[in-house]
Structure formats: C-alpha cells, structure tokens
Image (cartoon, grey):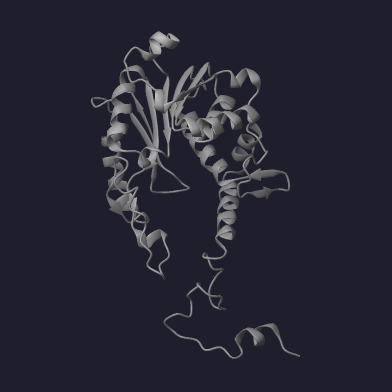
Amino acid sequence: MSLFWEKQSSNRKFDLKTFRNTKNHNIFASWSPYTRGLTFHNFLINYYVNNNKKEFLNFKKSINNLNIGNPPSILYENKFNITYDDCVSFEELNFLSNIFKKKKLDLIMEVGPGYGRMAETIIKNFEVKKYFVIDYKNILILTKEYLSKVLKKKDFKKIIFLNFENFSFKKDFFIKNYNIKKFDLFFNSDSFHEIEKKIIKRYLNYFSPISKNFFIKNAVGKYKPKDLIDHLTKKKVPQTIKPLGLCNEEINIFDKKKITSQSKKFLARYNPYKNSKKTYSKLSEIYQSTLLSIFRK
C-alpha cells in the first residue's frame, strides 16, 4: 500500500534555493497565494470578524445581507454573507461613531461614493437629513441602482446625486440650489489617493469654508512594487497611479515606523483647515498603510 506522504515525496528533487517557493505546488510551503489567493482573503475576513464579533454582527444586522454584485464572501455562522467591504465599512463606521457620539450628521457630502457602501452604512446608522454624493455620471448610475435596492424609499430620497462632469465649484452653488450654507461632514474614502493633486486641492479649498468636519481615509504613501506584486516574475507595478494623491512617497508598507512618520505628512497635506489642530487619526487595522482621519474646524 502506498501511503499519502510516500506519494508526495517520491521521485522529487528538492533545491534549497527554491524549496519553499509557492509558484508551483510543493510539500513544504503553505497554499500558494498565486492560485489560492481567495483562501487567504477569506481567512482574513474570518479573522477580522472573530476579533470584533459582537460589534461586527450588530453592524452587519444594520446593513444588507444580499451580496449584491456577487463579491467574494464568507458565510459566517451559516447566516451572514460577509465581504471585505463589510469589514472596511465596519471600521469606518466605528471611527465615525467614536467621534460623533450623538450619531447625528444632518448634511453630508461624499466625494467618490463608488457603489454606495458607506452611504448605505451611514444612513442606516446615523440620523441624516440629506446625503450628497459626487462622482462620474457612469458610476452614479450603478450607485443609484445599488442604493435603491438596499435603502427604504424614505431613506433613498435623502440622497442627492451630483455628476462630477456637471458639478460647479461656484461658492453659491449649494445655497442657490439647495439652501445649504454648511455641511456637517465632508467624506472621502479610498479615492483621493487615485485622483490628481489639482482636483484634490480644489475639493479641499472649495469645501473647507462650507464644511464643519472632514473625514479623509486614504493611503499614506505608495507601496514598493516588490511588496505586493509577483516577486518571481518581477513584474512592474502600473505607474499610472503613482503621481496621484497627495502622498506619493514610495514606502515599505510593512514598516510601522515609516508608516507612522508618513502619517504626519498625510495629516499636514490633507488638512483642509490649515490653522486647525483638531485632528483625530487612526491607522487601519485591515490595510495598515491607510489612515482614517477627521479634521475639525
């Protein structure tokens, strides 16, 4: 009888230089991230949820469990469809809730809402009167479809969709069109670091006089190609996003000291209120080179 490990080891030659290389299946390494990336992705979600179980499941009950868009997910406790985006939204909501303890933000402006995950999260967990979103027309078509599926009609009516292509940066735009003088919160998550500097600065300069608080969560720097790409083929990371955002330094995103140092530059560059030191910040537990920050007027 041929035993399992006898089969695995027979007729193999082992090279000390490559015996733990996971590009091809071998018996000494963990699952290959090249072919089993989803395995590690799902274990990461499970680990994060387990570390925040009670609070996370309460949060998950407040949002949808529909898995719209067919994202990779885990079926937690045979009941909850949980995605990576759910983990990100949970972390952002907790950060906001710790600062705005009354859970009331009447007027919100979000730039770059994507499909609407945080618009859903905030509207379902905060007292909100109007929630504005700005993005490209083509993206907002999807945002509208998604939010119409996950929000009650009365909550969906709170959202005002503004096409970036038609958006006016005139000072009186919101007073004239919506009778709004100030927003309680300006919100941007994971998109400023993929936007041209001049556009970011235009947003900061335009909204700082008419916003009481800014939430900005973005990367504190650019990752080194060898840290996140195929270390075997030496592929180069696309350079198109390197000049985007306000923090373009290439850093080791696994060096806590460097990330902490770079975070200071982030806070200085993204602070829309140049004379204000009322800032709150926290490095993400999920993607640790990303900083969650609140700037208060």
> Percent position (x, y) of residue 273?
28, 25
Q: Is residue 106 above or below residue 274?
A: above
Q: Is residue 207 above or below residue 34?
A: above
> Percent position (x, y) of residue 47?
57, 52
Toward the right, the furthest residue is 1
Please state which of residues 211 and 90 is positioned toward the viewer in this rendering. 211
In the displayed structure image, the side of residue 273 where residue 39 appears, left or right: right
Give the total number of marks visible in the rendering.
0
The residue lying at 60 percent from left, 40 percent from top is 56
> Percent position (x, y) of residue 107?
46, 18
Please state which of residues 193 and 283 is positioned toward the viewer in this rendering. 193
In the displayed structure image, the side of residue 74 where residue 96 appears, left or right: left
In the displayed structure image, the side of residue 252 where residue 154 appears, left or right: right
Residue 297 visible in the displayed image: no
Residue 217 visible in the displayed image: yes
Q: Quadrant of residue 43?
A: bottom right
Image quadrant in which the N terminus is located: bottom right
The residue lying at 39 percent from left, 10 percent from top is 175
The residue lying at 55 percent from left, 46 percent from top is 84
Q: Is residue 150 above or below residue 175?
A: below
Q: Is residue 211 above or below residue 279?
A: above
> Percent position (x, y) of residue 171?
31, 15
Image quadrant in which the C terminus is located: top left
In the displayed structure image, the side of residue 141 where residue 162 appears, left or right: left
